[in-house]
Image: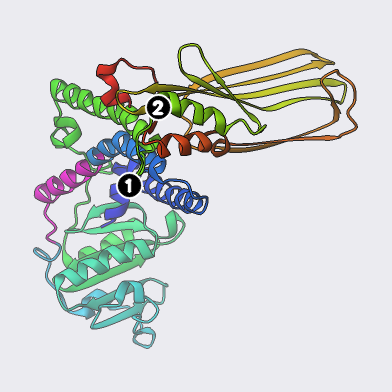
Amino acid sequence: MHRLHHWFAEYPVLVGLAAAAAITLLVAAVLAVTMHRAGVSLKPLVWIFVLIGLIGLPQAAVHVLDVIRFEQQRADAQPAQAAAVLQPVPWELVFGHNADPSLMTDPRAALAPVLGEAAIAVLSFTAEGESALAARFADARAATRALDAYGNFFQFALARGSDRAGWTARRYGGGGEWNHVVVAGNELYAWTGPSREAVIARRERVLGSWQPPPPTPPQRAHEARLVSGSLSGPALLGFAALNLAAVVAWFFWGAAWAARTDPGPDAHPMPASVLRLQVLAAYAGGGPVQADAAPDGSILLDWNYADARWFDLMHLHRLQRTQRLVLNFDEAERTVRVREYWSRIDTSAGYGGLRLAWQHSSGIELFRVEEERHYGIQLDAAGRPSGELVHATRFDSRLLKQPAIDRVTAAGWRWQPTLVSAPRWMRWLTG
């Protein structure tokens, strides 16, 4: 009885695992739909959730295996024999001599969640307001299912007992009357009364002595044989090392795979010198991105997509947002390896002092669309009011990268963003 309650009491992490799985699936579905509508590859989504799975699934698997092992050992230690000892008795004994025949009724409709499988059931009352229930089922298993449903339906609290000997508890979370419910063969009996002693006395008059278990929660003497407890130190360290290696490998290799764009099958490879000129020409139309050739043969793509000054509430503000791509051409592998950098500078001065926030990062930005609005008296580069009250900025990583990606792949080369500038022997991992 109370199997789910027992699972959650012993393993509350199961509730967290179920909630985490549901939230993860929901977020994945929303992101997949959003990215598909925006025409963005779903490979970044695959990379992120495989990474989450490599970290979380081994831990979840151990918890689930613990539950399965615990239930197996619990069943071996105390088999569910609810009907193996107690035998059905005449219902007149269940109801008692003081039951009022005029108040006996068929409760199956009112207690359908409990008695839905019952072939026959009778609920009796006494003049003192106590009740007794007797119900007959097709077999002992159906009676045991009704026993479980009875405790859940009446919200048992302070429960003591077992499926084999019967349960004594208080209804409605501890605020109702006392109950004793038990299975005998293919029949279910239940008595209510004002106290624990009263319902136990009625049960013992009908079915004999009942010795309640100690009031402490059930002890898990076999806990050391659970999966998590049976992992030795070396085995645990070995598994942790393998799992960490898999996570690190997927982090680098998966990120490179998710950001990679391969050339089309019909593309004809071009020399690196021609490709450099084509990439520079793609940004020569006076757009927001500035393309420059570096002395080492790489190309720098810079987008200062936010540079604003404004005054509001006795404060002068300044912000700058810059995104940079460094394109390195590997002619031997027909690959353009891309390192990405971005910086943010926010300053304000006025009443309360000076505040400066600066951030510089590098890595792989799979996709990003960002919009900002700043309200106040806008200032031009010379510090004079420009007449505007709102400054809006918008950044879309596709506008920065896509012209270069198109030129690179059309030239028969691979576009390969990387997290680090790795030596050649490590490029199988980093891209």
Residues packed near mark 2 inside 10 Å, few (<14), some (14 to 19) or many (20 plus): many
User: Which residue is tagged 2?
Assistant: 336
Nearest the eye: 65 or 430 = 430
Q: Amino acid at mark 1?
A: Phe
- Expressed as whole percent of the image width and height from the top left, the position of residue 204 reads 21, 63
Quarter holding residue 395: top right
Task: Identify the residue at horizontal 41%, vertical 38% (top origin).
Answer: 409
Task: Identify the residue at horizontal 84%, vertical 21% (top origin).
Answer: 315
- Residue 360 in the figure: left or right of residue 258: right
Q: Secondary structure at mark 1?
A: helix
Per the image, is 75 magenta?
A: yes
Q: Residues under labels 1 and 2: Cα distance?
A: 53 Å
Q: Is residue 191 above or below residue 122?
A: above
Q: Which mark is residue 8?
A: 1
Nearest the eye: 283 or 11 = 283
Q: Is residue 204 above or below residue 219?
A: below
Task: Identify the residue at horizontal 46%, vertical 12% (top origin).
Answer: 296
- Residue 76 in the figure: left or right of residue 425: left
Which region is colored magenta? 63-81
Mark nearer the viewer, 1 or 2: 2
Whether residue 267 can be seen here = yes
